[in-house]
Image (cartoon, helix red, strand yellow):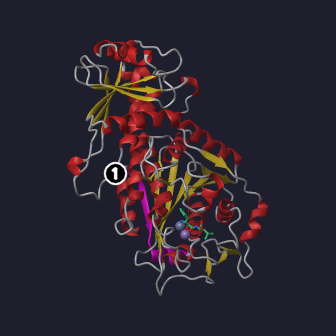
Amino acid sequence: MHKDTTVVLSKTMISAGSSVLAALSEDGLKISGALKVVDGMSGNAVSLAVKNGFKAEKGELKMLYPAGKLHAVLLLGLGKRAELKQDQFIDGVADGAKAARSAGITELHVLADSFGVEDSIRGITLGSMLGTHRFMKYKTKDLAKVKNLGKITIMAEDPAKQQKAFDEAKIVADAVKKTRDMVNTPPNVAGTEEVAQYAKKIAAENRLKCTLLEEKDMEKLGMGCITAVGKGSAAKPKIAILEYNGGAGKPVLLVGKGVTFDSGGYNLKPTNYINNMKDDKAGAITMLHVIEAVARLGVKANVVAAVALAENMVSGMAYRPDDILKAYNGMTVEVTNTDAEGRLVLADTLAYSVEKHKPQAVVDIATLTGATMIALGHFTTPIVGTDEKLIGQLKEAADATGEKVWQLPLWEEYGEAMKSDVADLKNSTDGPDAGVITGAMFLKNFVGEAPWAHLDIGTTVWSKADKGAKQKGATGVCVRTLIEFVKNWK
Ligand code: BES
Ligand code: MN
Ligand code: ZN
């Protein structure tokens, strides 16, 4: 079985034979403190590298095999320290760890103090853990040949001062890793029942209250939308609700789309579009790990996570175009496209959990539309909502973590496109125009009066590149932003 890289924090101690990752910035290319020791132990390899052209430009990486006592010295350029964004910092560390692994290094020592600035320990921890993480659970052959960086030791002069930041960053990185793993888990393994059990396990391990609504409960409650989406699958739809009580007052409500596989239903997705639709549960998986991290961090807030689980399949039982459904809040919805199922499962989940928990604010996250790619491309998550303050708080949290979100408008006029001739709403528009926004406009009908924001991770959920902190596959996008958001919640 493959094991992920272990990351620990310890006091700086550079011993013979070790491999060291150190950073330099363009501001002066200063070789001081522990880096000076490294330079001394490596026959001045660091000073020579600088003399011979290492400029410490942003992302510049130089692997040295010096004469002297050390096995390898890996230099990472940070560019101008003040201009370096948190995501670039994390990606730099991650690329450093990846380079060390490719070079066959099995234990890496990171010289934290060479990165400058007190709070760099967070970025180093995240870069080390996310950059090395891989999804290998289903690989059975030639595992011994896979290069493995067994351990990263982050070394600081005064580790006690950094311990809290390190422990917190580890909780956050774990949340991202677990999100990636679960989103990468195939739909024959992670169906609605398995994800519901997974939610229960998280709740039990973190002493959260957990309520599971089964299909029968949902039918009784009048949730005609999520039950319709689930009809075509042997895996029954469910809603899992986790509650964390860390503070006073009404909770923040986190809602996630958990479609364990999206075939499109009778509006079947074609080849190339149907592949990867296991990632359609990412919203739900994200919220489960956000509430888990919030609990592990002991954040002083009340949080409820409600995740909508269903599988969108084709069968004689499946819902069809032209069906008219009745949502939990009484609104009727004409199905014009069975592939616009995400908004249906969210409609009932939002309406029910808002009514039940009377939240101060609602945030939902969903792989809702492919239109996200046209709107903002591969690395920016669109955000929309009804409350500028709430959106501002989410944008601030995203900025702090280095994730990229960008607001799109939610002007009333966009609602026109969701009106049906025969019901209150239809679930898809006639054309592709403004797909991210019209999808959100649909959801807006189900959030009541509470301030609400919606993150559409239809594109950012997945990475095609193995670069920086990302691996090919699920990204765990917005986990960090949402944890930061709840941490700062007042
Ligand atoms: N899960 C998809 C969105 C998606 C598509 C995510 C591609 C990632 C990659 C969602 O259920 C969907 O099919 N949306 C449709 C909506 C349309 C029918 C209104 C879409 O985006 O095409
Ligand atoms: Mn769909
Ligand atoms: Zn979907």
Query: Where 292 falls versus 431 (above or below)?
Result: above
Query: Which residue reaches farthest bottom?
Result: 316
Whole-percent x, y for residue 167 in the image: 38, 34
Category of crowding for the residue at label 1, using alpha-carbon neighbours closer than 10 angstroms: few (below 14), some (14–19), many (at least 20): few
Residue name at image x 42 percent, y 59 percent: 210
Quarter of the figure with the C terminus:
top right
Q: Residue 364, can we see it? A: yes
Q: Nearer the viewer, residue 160 or 459?
A: 459
**Residue 426: which quarter of the image?**
bottom right
Which stretch is magenta? 207-221
* Residue 269 in picture, x, y percent from top left: 52, 73
Q: Is residue 253 left or right of residue 420?
A: left
- Residue where numbered disc 1 is placed: 205
Q: Work out whether 299 lies above or below 367.
A: above
Instruction: Give residue 160's position: percent from left, percent from top.
Output: 36, 22
Q: Secondary structure at mark 1?
A: helix
